[in-house]
Amino acid sequence: MLEDCNNLTDSELVDKVLRNREYFRCIVERYDNKLLRYILRITSVNKEDAEDILQDIFISAYKNLNNFNKDLKFSSWIYRIAHNRVISVWRKAKRTPVLFKNNDSLEIFNNIISKDDIFLDLIKKDLEREVGGILNKLKKEYAEVLILKFLEDKSYAEISDILKKPMGTIATLINRAKKQFKEMIVRQK
Amino acid sequence: MTNNLADKITEKIKKENIQPKPKWVFLLKDYVIWGVFTLNIFLGGLFFAVTLLVINNTDWDIYKYLDGSLWRYFISVLPYFRLSALLLFLFLAFYNYRHTPRGYRYKNRKIIIMSVIISGMIGLTLFLFGAGYKIEQLFFTGVPFYKSLEQHRQEMWYRPEAGLLSGEVVEIISSEKIKIKDYKNKFWLIDVSETSWRGPVRHPQVSKQLKIIGQKVSPKEFKAKEIRPWFGGRHNRAHRK
């Protein structure tokens, strides 16, 4: 009989799984929706394919559980596995993914542009249509950091751990991504 | 989806008897990366030491016996192979550090500066304790192509018409005359009566390699004004015999 997982931290859960694999179910249940949404955001695959990828991610996480370092947040560690898995899917497909869905575009846009921003007026009209197009034109690395920052709500330190890049580089990437995003809006207008 | 996926995954784990990889596999990988990083830093230090040795032993004043351009001389005497090896090992150290578990957290610039400082300190320590010369000699005997690196230097010091000669002492005829064999196996009679000695060698010794500045007197005779050891001199003060 499994103990209630809800009161356990991720780290405690990992220790439990290493003693009793049945507890891995709790990790899956805790992260499956988040990771599925993440996969759908950064790839152009359909839901069924995304679920297959998700299953691979969890199996990979289970196999590498002893490599989880408690200095990291477990969520950063499993997002890193997801990120790497998606990269290998891209490589196999040999095509650039369509990164954003329109509903995400609107959300990310609202997060990037502050309310007193001079661009606010520009975005009021036919926002969704234009923004979706612009986001898909962004460089892949810019799009990735924007997804993690503004959609997955990750901190700079977490993004650094997920993408395995220094925090300073992450900050630079986010700033450049925002700048490029705004420039594209202006150009489009 | 949650229960369905969790069921599928736990079922797959059981059915295929999937196990987490043992901890030692990951620890071993980390230790190997750290070990290779340390090795590269140390090898970088060795080449730092020999680079310092070569630069320290370069005769910066002989350009005037050549074509008179200090800049061209500087370009021609830089120890390119040792510098390339130093850069290679620093790059490998950087690459390995990047692949350590937390290596990604530091900027490239920081890792490179740190690697240069550590290798530089090792190299400087080895050089100051005289190990640079021993390492250079080890490379000479152990690395097949290493001797060919000396050819350029030998050619530079084989210009009797311009007043430069080098070779190995084969006979001490008197306190004023010695016989040397140059790198083309030609014998020369050297007049050392009015020469100044530089470096730790203060008198001729058989089988010592010497560099001589002076004047060609005849096709087989050379009058020395200054004699320096071929390599390894840690002091460069002139000393008149």
Image (spheres, coloured by chain):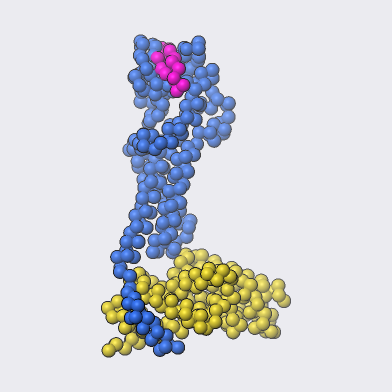
Chain colours: A yellow, B blue
In this view, the residue in front, B221 or A57, is A57
Note whether residue B233 is visible. Answer: yes
In this view, the residue in front, B211 or A133, is A133
- Rendered position, B239 above or below B173: below
Q: How many marks?
A: 0
Residue B181 belongs to magenta span: yes
* Residue B98 percent location from the top left of the image: 43, 59
Q: Which residues are magenta?
A: B179-194
Q: Residue at x 38, y 72 (%)?
A: A72
Q: Residue at x 44, y 64 (%)?
A: B105
Q: Residue furthest front?
A: B15
Q: Residue at x 49, y 69 (%)?
A: A88
- Rendered position, B52 above or below A106: above
* Residue A138 percent location from the top left of the image: 61, 71
Residue B166 belongs to magenta span: no
* Residue A98 percent location from the top left of the image: 59, 76
Q: Is residue B190 left or right of residue B29?
A: right
Q: Residue at x 44, y 83 (%)?
A: A32
- Rendered position, B99 above or below B90: below
* Quarter that holds the N terminus of chain A: bottom left
Which image quadrant for residue A182? bottom right
Which image quadrant for residue B226? top left
In this view, the residue in front, A18 or A34, is A18
Note whether residue A106 is visible. Answer: no
- Rendered position, A170 above or below A125: above
* Quarter that holds the C terminus of chain A: bottom right
